[in-house]
Amino acid sequence: MGNIQSSVVISLTVFSVYVLYVHIYSSHTLLRANTLTSERLPSSIYLNIKYLTQAVTRRRGRLYEGASNRQVVYTVLNSRLEPHLLRRFCSLAGYGWDYPDTDFRDTPLCFPECLCLRLLLMMVLTDENFRLSPAGLVCLHQTVKTLQPVDELKKGPFQLKLGVLDYHQIDAGVEVDVCLSATSRTGCVVWESVLTLLSTNKSNKPRRCLPRRENESQPDEPMQEDVKQVALRVPRTIFLQCGWSSSLTYRLLSLPALLCGYRSPISPSLWMLSACLSEIEKHRGVEVITAPVTVTANFKEHLLVPGRVTVNFWETNQRQSAAQRLSFNMHQQGTNITLMEGSISRP
């Protein structure tokens, strides 16, 4: 009996040392540098522990001072496109599981964001100099630009970069602008996205309508006669699948919202935008979103699942501009609720 107890104690000790070194110490050491490689990234267990710690110790909607003046920015070198992750992304977003194998079609516009959100976003949100609580952040606005076809990232190792741009104090809480980018092996920026996230005050009661920035464009442009409508079903499992990886990032970012009165899981903004772009490409052709292109999206309401939505898109007349523009939005079926709206502009 004594030998068995000794073996158990030794095993637990070895396991504890392994966990402390591999998941805690080595991850802490890696995060002291702003530049990492895809072969050596911090443990998701360590990042989730930091996330939960800051979520408990920091109040939402409050701007904290950073531990130092160091800029919150992380770069991951030698990144590569992962075919199995790309296939799953395409299947869930509505492109089809065989999309990457189809000729003359570029890698989906939002896929690089999926790569950034797996671990890179968690590095930023849990950084000691990130001035907000990582819990309960809601995406309000997004601007995506492709300067070159996203397929350029297939040609070799590329660089992912994510950093904080600025903070904005508003009545509803604090907004933070986060920039994501992907740079090809030749050093040229291929893809860039700016997310505006909101940390709401605890004193504000949960409400369906998300706050709007003062400089944001007015909602609901009048639709043209050639508007195209597409009905989509949103399954309950989309919430569990939208991480498109084993990362807990999406689940953790959504947990506070689930505890604030929403009875159903909330589908990520990434899925809503990707679903709209996939339907636009199917009906208007891939040339509509071929680089160079700029996509803007305003997320106005939470999408509760399961349910059904309607995607609308139409060409916008711009007599005083040479740019070609397509507007789109997503509605909850059976209601007048606009979940999101956006536009696609090309030179």
Image (cartoon, grey):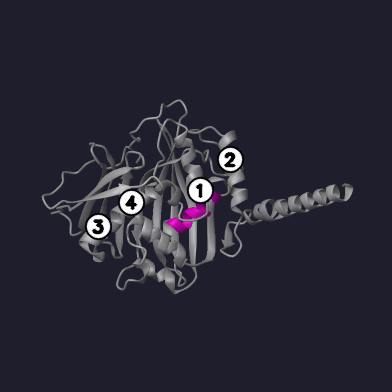
Question: What main secondary structure does the magenta stretch of the protein show?
Answer: helix
The circle on residue 273 is: 4
Mark 3–mark 2 distance (CA, rounded to whole Å): 38 Å
Which sits earlier in the primary sequence, circle 2 or circle 1? 2
> Taking 51 as reference, is 174 left or right?
left
User: Are discs 3 and 2 less than 8 Å apart at CB?
Assistant: no
Rendered location of residue 169, percent (x, y): 43, 35
Helix, strand or loop at mark 1: helix
> Taking 23 as reference, is 175 left or right?
left
Going by the numbered disc 3, the residue's amino acid type is: Ile
Helix, strand or loop at mark 4: helix
Q: Residue at x 50, y 70 (%)?
A: 157
Identify the magenta region.
Answer: 114-123
Q: Residue at x 40, y 41 (%)?
A: 266
Q: On the image, numbered disc 3 is attached to which residue?
A: 280
Going by the numbered disc 1, the residue's amino acid type is: Thr
Which sits earlier in the primary sequence, circle 4 or circle 3? 4
Q: On the image, numbered disc 2 is attached to which residue?
A: 52
> In the rendered view, would you say 306 is above or below 161?
above
Rendered location of residue 184, percent (x, y): 44, 69
Rendered location of residue 209, percent (x, y): 33, 34
Does the magenta-highlighted stretch encompass residue 119?
A: yes
Q: Residue at x 70, y 52 (%)?
A: 19
Does the magenta-highlighted stretch encompass residue 101?
A: no
